[in-house]
Amino acid sequence: MKKLSKFLISSVILFFILTLFLGFQIFSIQKGHQFFQKQPHYLPALYVEGNSIKRSDNHNKVQLKGVTTMAFAYDGYQIDKGFIEILEKLKLWKVNLLGLYADPLIIKTI
């Protein structure tokens, strides 16, 4: 009896961990016959209206988080070494707008 109660308690704890922390939601059997279904997280499409950028799902204005940078190269320094590392950092900072200046006299191809 004690083992059964420990099993039930651990099952309930596992159930709450799955539902609360991992984003699972429980659906009834009438809705698709699935007990667990993970909700996909899609970003809405953006559109331009006047001088603002808006979301297509709720039509709210989007605040852009941007950075402007310059790609440069000189003897012994290839653009793909350091610049790609900077772009990887921008992913971590969740930058959604990037302005890039590249001098065509210095950089032939990027």
Image (tube, grey):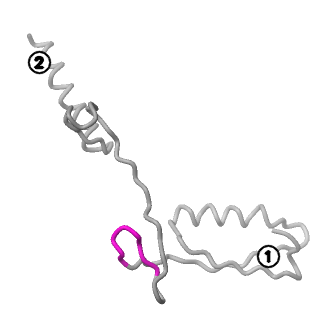
What are the residue bounds of the magenta stretch? 53-60
Residue 57 location, quadrant:
bottom left
Say left or right for 73 vs 48.
right
Q: Which image quarter holds the N terminus?
A: top left
Q: Earlier in the sequence, mark 1 or mark 2?
A: 2
For disc 1, the neighbor class at 10 Å (few under 14, some 14 to 19, many from 20) is some
Closer to the camera in the image, 6 or 22:
22
* Dot 1 and dot 2 residues touching (CB under 8 Å): no
Q: Which residue is tagged 1?
A: 72
* Residue 105 belongs to magenta span: no
Q: Residue 8, position in %: x, y?
A: 15, 22
Amino acid identity at mark 1? Phe
- The CA span between labels 1 and 2 is 66 Å
Residue at (35% x, 77% y) in the render: 60
The residue that label 2 is drawn on is 5
Amino acid under disc 2:
Ser
Of residues 25 and 108, the one drawn nearer to the viewer in this rendering: 25
On the rendered image, what quadrant is the C terminus found in?
A: bottom right
Q: Of helix, strand and loop, which one carries label 1?
A: loop
Q: Can you give x and y, in whole percent of width and height, for residue 46 in the image?
A: 47, 71
